[in-house]
Amino acid sequence: MIVRIDVGERLDLTAYKLFSEAISCAVENPRVVGIQVDFSATQRLFDSGKAMLLNLKKRTKHLKIPLRLANISPEIRQKLYGRTYNPI
């Protein structure tokens, strides 16, 4: 089972509940084999959203569950990764 997070139009602290529920599901359900964050509708990315992604990455790494970022537009990809190294 893959837990999917549909970020919506903007990734900021309003998505906190979605991220928390995904981690809870992954911890409580041994059938979870991955978490996918879907950016298909995302138009705006805030620093708080980037921080949540970093936290999610740390948690999934600790749980040994793959994290996949899907459907990222070029604009959001630029904001996530920038021109310098970014650990997301």
Image: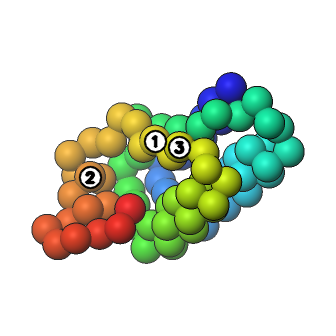
> Of residues 46 and 71, which is closer to you in this image?
71
Question: What separation in Å lies between label 3 and label 2 (alpha carbons)?
Answer: 19 Å
Q: Which corner quadrant holds the C terminus?
A: bottom left
Kindly give the residue lying farthest to the left in the view shown: 83
Q: Is residue 69 left or right of residue 23?
A: left
**Residue 40 image point, x, y percent:** 40, 35
Q: Are marks 1 and 3 in contact (CB under 8 Å)?
A: yes
Q: Secondary structure at mark 3?
A: loop
- The x, y position of residue 66, in whole percent, is 53, 43
- Which of the pair 23/66 is nearer the observer? 66
Q: In the displayed structure, would residue 56 be above or below residue 69?
A: below
Q: Which mark is residue 68?
A: 1
Q: Residues within 10 Å of mark 1 (few under 14, many from 20)?
A: few
Residue appearing at x 74%, y 44% in the figure? 26
What residue would you read off at disc 3? 66
Q: What mark, if any, has residue 77 been given in the picture?
A: 2
Q: Nearer the viewer, mark 3 or mark 2?
A: 3
List x then y, in percent, for residue 3: 65, 35
Q: Please state which amino acid type lies under the numbered disc 2.
A: Arg
| Image quarter of the N terminus | top right
Q: Amino acid at mark 3?
A: Pro
- Residue at 59% x, 40% y: name it: 35
Q: What distance separates the C-alpha of mark 1 from that of mark 3?
A: 7 Å
Q: From the top left corner, tell me how far across and down residue 8 is, in percent.
A: 52, 43
Q: Indicate whether 23 appears above or below 32.
A: below
